[in-house]
Amino acid sequence: MAEDLQIVKGNKVEQYQNLIPQIKGLLTGEPDLIANLANITAALKEQFGWFWIGFYIVKNDELVLGPFQGPVACTRIKKGRGVCGTSWAKAETLIVPDVEQFPGHIACSSLSKSEIVVPLIKEGIVWGVLDVDSSTLDQFDATDKLYLEDILALIEY
Ligand code: SME
């Protein structure tokens, strides 16, 4: 049984460095992918309080909504569409400081202002993405990219 998450205040680096060992602990010994993706979104939501945090998983050549925290969202995204589909097509993390400036951005909510999407890659193939939306402009930077990529590297698929 998982303990309560220990939440810290402080700068972003301190918050990630406190959170990552706890996420490792949550994932250790649990082979179920959905359970692990669900706990990762919950842990990130508790620590950072971002507007929307969730996974999309590649199924039949589309991204399909997976475990998430936040308001209801678009269920399917095609390759190359929106920030998520572009991150999938490029197999790279995308930081979008202002979603209105991203051509083709898919607005699941008008409250989302900035976004980071990190691909889940195994043996060179993208099998999903983590999408994080903020209601604040310019929320995400290279620190988020670094630590979110570290967190995704903990997932066994
Ligand atoms: N904004 C994303 C779509 C997913 S929602 O934000 C949850 C995009 O442009 O891909």
Image (spheres, helix red, strand yellow):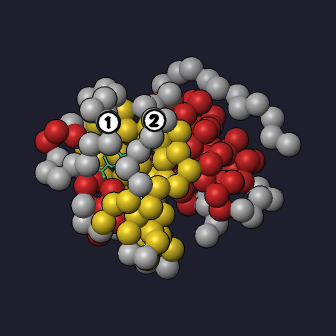
Residue at screen point 57% across, 20% down = 9
**Does any atom of ligand 1 lie closer than 8 Å to the CB of label 1?**
yes
Nearer the observer, 20 or 128: 128
**Does any atom of ligand 1 lie closer than 8 Å to the CB of label 2?**
no
Q: Extreme bottom residue here?
A: 123
Q: Which mark is residue 93?
A: none
x and y, in percent, of residue 94 in the image: 30, 53
Instruction: Indicate whether 37 appears above or below 121.
Output: above
Question: Label 1, label 2: how many angstroms apart (C-alpha)?
Answer: 8 Å
Instruction: Indicate whether 135 appears above or below 73.
Output: above
- Is 73 left, or right, of 26 in this rendering? left
Locate residue 8: give its quadrant. top right
- What element does badge 1 sit on? loop
| Quadrant for the N terminus in the image | top right
Picture mark count? 2
- Kind of residue at badge 1: Ser
x and y, in percent, of residue 32 in the image: 72, 62
x and y, in percent, of residue 6 in the image: 70, 28
Q: Which residue is mark 2?
A: 71
- Kind of residue at badge 2: Pro
Are circles 1 and 2 on residues that touch, CB within 8 Å?
yes
Q: Which residue is mark 1?
A: 109
- Is 152 left, or right, of 33 in this rendering? left
Nearer the observer, 66 or 119: 66
x and y, in percent, of residue 22 in the image: 70, 41
- Residue 149 visible in rendering: no
Mark 1: give few (<14), some (14-19) or many (20+) Cα within 10 Å: some
